[in-house]
Amino acid sequence: MSGAKTILNDDLLCKEYKREIKVSSTINPVRVESSFENVLIKDVNDTFQKCFDTLQLKNKDYGGSDKTPYSNFMNSTIVGVSVEKGIMVRMMDKVSRINTLLEKENVVKDESINDTLEDLINYVAILKSYLKNK
């Protein structure tokens, strides 16, 4: 009898887990909440959510709109650099800064290594989106 009870409880857990995923992904498809996550999955999920939130704010600050979301990056063409290469230059700046911050403490206190890593993640996502939509 206890075996049947265990199966029933496991079945209920599975249904609850699926319901939790469904409700969470319906509300916010970027954020998947679950009590079964390991630290890596949770940290990556939190990182992507933070990057996504920052990307939305910066896109507005830099004049991106629904019609011209890449407008800031298109400015590189004024000096003869393709949009793709312009984004790559920004990515390389971030890689260089990460390298420096791994070797010594940052002097500029309002841009931590985490901020720089998040910027790099966003530039990779921006390049991916630009290549898909150009």
Image (cartoon, rainbow, N blue to C red):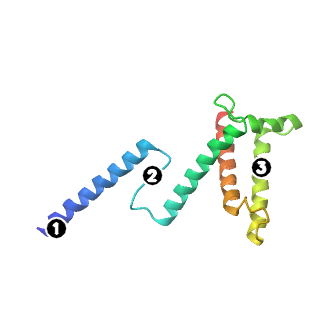
Residue 22 x %, y %: 37, 46
Real-space Cα separation, disc 3 to disc 2, in angstroms: 30 Å
Q: Residues within 10 Å of mark 1 (few under 14, many from 20)?
A: few
What residue is at 79 percent from the left and 60 percent from the top? Answer: 96
Query: Contact, CB < 8 Å: mark 1 with mark 3?
Result: no
| Contact, mark 1 vs mark 2 (Cβ under 8 Å) | no
Mark closer to the observer (1, 2): 2
Quarter placement of the C terminus: top right
Q: Which residue is most to the left?
A: 1
User: Residue under circle 2?
Assistant: 32
* Helix, strand or loop at mark 2: loop
Query: Where is residue 81 shown, x and y percent of the image?
Result: 84, 40
Q: Where does label 1 land, which residue?
A: 3
Dot 2: within a 10 Å radius of its alpha carbon, few (fewer than 14), some, or many (20 or more) residues? some
Q: Quadrant of the N terminus?
A: bottom left
Left or right of residue 111: residue 79:
right
If you read the primary sequence from the N terminus, does the residue marked by circle 1 or circle 3 appear first? 1
Q: Residue at x 76, y 39 (%)?
A: 73
| Mark 2: amino acid | Val
Q: Amino acid at mark 3?
A: Arg
Total labels: the figure holds 3
- Identify the amino acid type marked 1: Gly
The answer to which quarter of the image holds residue 126 is top right
Local secondary structure at mark 1: helix
Residue 87 vertical placement versus 133 (above, below)? below
Horizontally, residue 131 falls left or right of residue 48, namely: right
Cα distance between the residues tagged 1 and 2: 31 Å
Q: Which mark is residue 90?
A: 3
